[in-house]
Amino acid sequence: MPKDLNITILLDVYGQLLTEKQRFAIDMYYNEDLSLAEIAEEIDISRQGVRDSIKQGEKHLVEYEEQLGIVKRFHNINSHIGKLRELLNKCGFKEIEEAEEILKRISEEI
């Protein structure tokens, strides 16, 4: 089963919306890099049950992102912040330090 590493980001954002079994299986599969057999042994279900749980959880995570778009907005905001930093670095005004500090605080909050 090929791994889509974007799932780890979606899991961080939407993981609490999944069932505990789905969240646990996806976390072990993507973040701990365990095999389906290892996960099956850990949570005492069949290998096929683990695969089904992961696939169903992935489907839900993608659907949540399609509906809510939190990850997409986060990436867009970070992109805009990066462009603002580039522009500020080209300016040379004294206020740049203050603007840079504001951008840093915004980045830390998102």
Image (tube, rainbow, N blue to C red):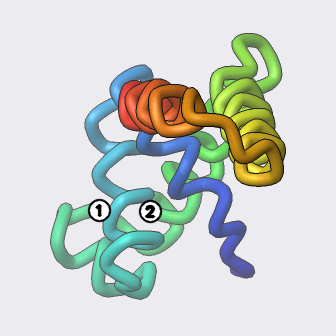
Checking the image for residue 14, the label placed there is none
Q: In x, y percent, where is residue 14?
A: 48, 29
Q: Nearer the viewer, residue 95 or 2?
A: 95
Residue density around tag 1, few if under 14, some if 14–19, many if 20 or more, within 10 Å = few
**What residue is drawn where x is 57% and y is 42%?**
10
Q: Nearer the viewer, residue 11 or 43?
A: 11
Answer above or below: position of 4 versus 75. Answer: below
Would residue 68 be visible to someone looking at this image? yes
Look at the numbered disc 2 and give the secondary structure of its residue.
helix
Name the quadrant of the N terminus.
Answer: bottom right
Choose the circle earlier in sequence order: 2 or 1.
Answer: 1
Q: Answer yes or no: do the residues labelled 2 and 1 have beta carbons within 8 Å?
A: yes
Give, as a three-letter code, the residue at label 1: Ile
- Residue closest to the eye, 55 or 84: 84
From where the camera sits, is residue 14 visible?
Answer: no
In the picture of the structure, the residue carrying the numbered disc 2 is 50
Residue at the spot of label 1: 45
